[in-house]
Image (spheres, rainbow, N blue to C red):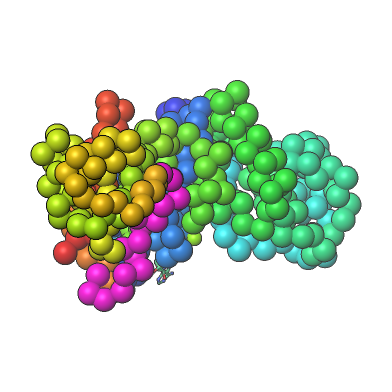
Amino acid sequence: MHDGSGRIVVQNLSKQFGAVNAVQNLSFTVEPGSVTGFLGPNGAGKTTTLRMLLGLVTPTSGMATINGRPHSQLGNPARVVGSVLENEGFHPGRTARNHLRVYAAAIGVPDRRADEVLGLVGLGSAADRKAGGFSLGMRQRLALATALLGDPQVLVLDEPTNGLDPEGILWLRNFLRSYAREQRRTVLVSSHLLNEVEQLIDQVVIISQGVTRYYGPLEQLRKSQQSRVLVQPADPSALVKALQENGITGVSPTPDGRVAVAGSTVQQIGDIAAKAGIAVYGMQEDHADLERMFFQLTQAQYTGAPGYPPPQQPQYQGPPPGYPPQQYPPSGPQHQQQHWGGPQQ
Ligand SMILES: Nc1ncnc2c1ncn2[C@@H]1O[C@H](COP(=O)(O)OP(=O)(O)O)[C@@H](O)[C@H]1O
Ligand SMILES: [Mg+2]
């Protein structure tokens, strides 16, 4: 039997479909009591990973366990893990309540549980309506209700914000947060859009091309955001030299002829430029937001040949132009450095 921990462990998990390395040596752990975002662009390998976790796809190598066991050895899996995967259909002619009753019977929970879960997801008033007439947002809620039938310890949701309006996303956020935190459940949520789940998640696993790019608390990723100043000088190399002579280290020229300066203020830069007699035509403060970091961490997938198809060995690619390398990846006691990776050449 399983150990009841509520922990999800993915360990050196890989899946190849013919020549496609859908998932490559992926490792992460999800603990109960928090919501973990599993993020990456389309085609990154999220659904394949979740399907391996749920016993629907056989890994090429590595392991995915829930409560210390592969899905096939969970005993009564619907009591342990509830899931919503992409493109799950409903019988269009069946009412929401009847759909849930069919599933309730299949996993051995009483009929009345159908009405309980409809209430939980805010579909109580639609219980007698046919699922075929539901909006995409209502279908997402009905799929979530189905996943909740067994009152599972672990919830795995693949792109649950797809089709939800802002009000639906807010509702989902409150629901999942209280499910995870107040009831000490484990929640793993995938998405290809960071901003749709940012408010919802505590921990994040970012992948692209089947490889982990970042794994750690979202807060850590946020803290690593560092602002920089973009300076437009008459003579970029003279400004770089002057700044460095004045002890400013985070200086790098940008491809468009400007100079990016991290860890310094507009005033400091202006004073140094004036003293060195270098004309400055403009300065702009620039903040690295999470969205951009997400893009930087995953963009290798879009670079095309020769970076595509996915290379074999992970290697961190480096920060965006103008950001000091030591800031990427963020480091700290909680951050697990060994999980950083990037495209390999
Ligand atoms: N059954 C399959 N047969 C062949 N290739 C597949 C199959 N399932 C997924 N893939 C490929 O694996 C890669 C990862 O897909 P997927 O896990 O669906 O990514 P995501 O969910 O992150 O969008 C993609 O290149 C996809 O085309
Ligand atoms: Mg997917």
160 within the magenta span: no
Q: Which of 126 and 57 is in front in this view?
A: 126
Which segment is the magenta one? 287-307
- The residue drawn where x is 24% and y is 58% is 234
Is 139 rendered above or below residue 198? below
Q: In which quarter of the image is the N terminus?
A: top left
Res 5 → quadrant: top left
Q: Which residue lies furthest to the bottom in this view?
A: 305
Q: Which image quadrant: the C terminus?
A: bottom left
The x, y position of residue 266, in whole percent, is 34, 39
Image x and y of residue 276, in percent: 16, 44
State the count of labels: 0
Residue that lies at the very extreme toward the top in this rendered image: 182
Residue 26 appears anywhere in the view: no
In the displayed structure, does residue 152 sit left or right of residue 15? right
At 60% from the left and 23% from the top, the residue drawn is 182
Q: Where is 118 relative to 55, above or below?
A: above
Res. 204 in view = yes
| Residue 51 place in picture, x, y as percent | 46, 55
Residue beneath the point at 71% across and 60% down: 136
Magenta run includes residue 288 = yes
